[in-house]
Image (cartoon, rainbow, N blue to C red):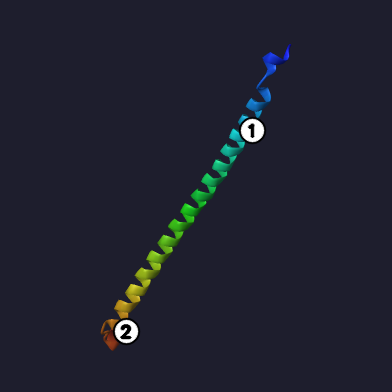
Amino acid sequence: MNRRSQRGGSTLAAVMLLLALGLMLLNAQHRQLDNALLLAADQQRYLQAYNQAASALSWGMLQRWPRAELSA
């Protein structure tokens, strides 16, 4: 085989290698973003539960509770 029929093989291999590396990096970033989204959802649920509990406590502190009902 002569040189003319083999021209561009190394360039094609380099481009394919770059594409493969880019795909791996995008896949890793996708996994990181999925984990960050799950963490943000957990934090949102925590903050909502905390605020509901704080609101209920604040409401309960302002109520007049008869002592007879509290000791029963």
24, above or below 45, in the image? above
Location of residue 27 by image quarter: top right
Disc marking residue 70: 2
Q: What residue occupies the far top of the structure in this picture?
A: 1
Q: Residue at x 69, y 17 (%)?
A: 6
Q: Amino acid at mark 1?
A: Leu
Disc marking residue 43: none
Q: Which residue is mark 1?
A: 17
Tell whether label 2 touches label 1 (CB within 8 Å): no
Between circles 1 and 2, the one closer to the viewer is: 1
Sort mark 1 into few (<14), some (14-19) or many (20+) by Cα contacts within 10 Å.
few
Residue closest to the eye, 28 or 61: 28
Quadrant position of the N terminus in the picture: top right
Sort mark 2 into few (<14), some (14-19) or many (20+) by Cα contacts within 10 Å.
few
Residue 7 spot, x, y in % from top left: 67, 19
Q: Disc 1 on helix, strand or loop?
A: helix
37, above or below 52, in the image? above
Location of residue 11 by image quarter: top right
Q: Amino acid at mark 2?
A: Leu
38, above or below 25, in the image? below
Q: Disc 2 on helix, strand or loop?
A: helix
Residue 69 spot, x, y in % from top left: 28, 83
